[in-house]
Image (tube, grey):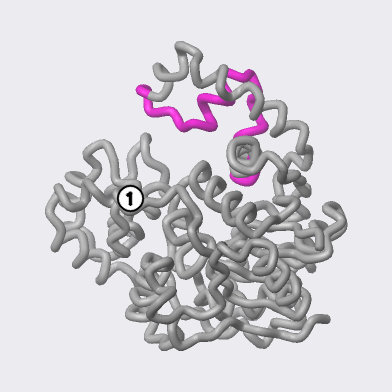
């Protein structure tokens, strides 16, 4: 069976995602589609609006198999996010990785990826890094490509191509041009497609505008949002106040003495928004700071970061996905494809379990990695 992977967040699942899955199936000529999905926390440095189990149900309206992206990767910048996503896809023996981009041209990214090693050795590269410029901006300036790496999905697309070149050279990358709505567009203005940002805002406002841009098959799953980033603040404030600067220094993504700024500003902050406004600098984007804060909340230590995939957590599947999983187990008997977490398999997923526990503390939900079996649905 030919398999196409999609590295996703589905926060929440909408028509644009369904379009992506269908296009991926066609462009890669795939028999089965696998969503490698962020769990309880997402790359923008926030808790997912719905828990991973509900989002798995949503995803199975289009995908055949849903697995969890390691939690460390889900709360990391593009390079490590892409690297671990590609390694999970390779562990699942996927033939192709299909991702959305503003460019829509895989040749653009392959061309830049071939030049990157040379660019990183350029004498101006480290100079620009010391100036506090972002990696994409430096690449843009040194390449003379002023537009390609100024949009979020193009930046991530380049990371995917790099990761495939480095870790899964037999995998074929494909990209699909983003359809209609921009990545962070804040309003629903198109009758069929909208950004995740706009849909979350509609859900939080309870205005029902989201109904036109989500698949009819899963519309009933869209209920009141369980968790927002502001809900994290009391727990986060306690975590920062309790920790010493030395402890904060060892948290994943905390760097360059930022722990001292955190300790100084948390005392004067009464909300997440207020804290963010006090922490923001030219050197640090909002997203980078938010990821840092979520890693502190979850107590994800840099020393625990893994570069190898030792097991994959299967969240859900339809009959086609189940058949593919069965073939994987036959083909790779030494690999660990875990459908149910128990005492013996839990050590593989320490950080994912921890993320679910803290997510549930804040949301009041009770579904966790031990009491929620793999989700199964009938194939269409």
Q: Position of residue 57 (x, y in %)?
A: 64, 80
- The residue at the point 81 percent across, 59 percent down is 2
Residue numbers of the magenta segment: 130-154
371 vs 113, left or right, is: left
- The residue at the point 71 percent across, 32 percent down is 110
Query: Label 1's element?
Result: loop
340 vs 198, left or right, is: left
- The residue at the point 49 percent across, 31 percent down is 135
Q: Eyeballing the image, is 308 above or below 283?
A: below
Asked whether 144 falls inside the magenta stretch, the response is yes
Residue wearing tag 1 = 252
Q: Position of residue 368 (x, y in %)?
A: 43, 82
Q: Is residue 252 visible?
A: yes
82 vs 34, left or right, is: left
Front one among 30 and 285 = 30
- The residue at the point 43 percent across, 74 percent down is 345
Q: Position of residue 230 (x, y in %)?
A: 36, 68
In what quadrant of the picture does the C terminus appear? bottom right
Q: Position of residue 76 (x, y in %)?
A: 44, 50
Front one among 174 and 327 = 327
Which quadrant of the structure image shows residue 94? bottom right
Q: Is residue 63 visible?
A: no
Asked whether 226 falls inside the magenta stretch, the response is no
Which quadrant of the structure image shows residue 184? bottom right
Q: Main secondary structure of the magenta part?
A: helix
């Amino acid at each position: 069976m030919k398999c196409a992977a999609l590295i996703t967040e589905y926060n929440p699942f909408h028509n644009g995602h369904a379009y992506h899955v269908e296009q991926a199936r066609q462009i890669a000529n795939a028999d089965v589609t696998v969503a490698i999905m962020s769990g309880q926390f997402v790359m923008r440095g926030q808790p997912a609006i719905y828990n991973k189990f509900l989002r798995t149900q949503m995803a199975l309206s289009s995908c055949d198999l849903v697995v969890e992206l390691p939690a460390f990767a889900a709360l990391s910048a593009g390079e490590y996010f892409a690297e671990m996503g590609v390694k999970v896809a390779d562990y699942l023996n996927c033939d192709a990785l299909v991702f959305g981009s503003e460019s829509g041209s895989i040749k653009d990214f392959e061309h830049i990826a071939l030049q990157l090693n040379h660019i990183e050795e350029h004498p101006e590269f480290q100079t620009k890094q010391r100036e506090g410029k972002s990696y994409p901006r430096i690449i843009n300036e040194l390449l003379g490509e002023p537009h390609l790496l100024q949009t979020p999905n193009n930046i991530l697309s380049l990371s995917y191509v790099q990761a495939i070149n480095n870790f899964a050279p037999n995998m074929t990358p494909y990209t699909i041009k983003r359809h209609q709505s921009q990545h962070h567009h804040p309003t629903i203005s198109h009758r069929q497609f909208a950004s995740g940002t706009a849909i979350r805002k509609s859900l939080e406002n309870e205005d029902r505008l989201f109904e036109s841009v989500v698949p009819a098959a899963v519309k009933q799953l869209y209920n009141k949002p369980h968790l927002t980033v502001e809900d994290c603040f009391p727990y986060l404030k306690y975590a920062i106040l309790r920790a010493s600067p030395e402890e904060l220094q060892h948290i994943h993504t905390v760097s360059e003495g930022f722990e001292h700024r955190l300790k100084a500003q948390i005392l004067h902050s009464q909300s997440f928004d207020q804290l963010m406004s006090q922490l923001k600098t030219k050197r640090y984007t909002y997203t980078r700071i938010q990821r840092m804060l979520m890693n502190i909340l979850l107590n994800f230590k840099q020393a625990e970061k893994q570069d190898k995939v030792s097991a994959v957590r299967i969240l859900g599947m339809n009959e086609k996905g189940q058949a593919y999983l069965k073939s994987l187990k036959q083909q790779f008997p030494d690999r660990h494809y875990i459908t149910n977490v128990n005492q013996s398999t839990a050590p593989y997923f320490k950080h994912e379990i921890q993320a679910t526990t803290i997510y549930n503390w804040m949301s009041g939900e009770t579904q966790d990695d031990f009491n929620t079996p793999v989700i199964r649905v009938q194939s269409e």
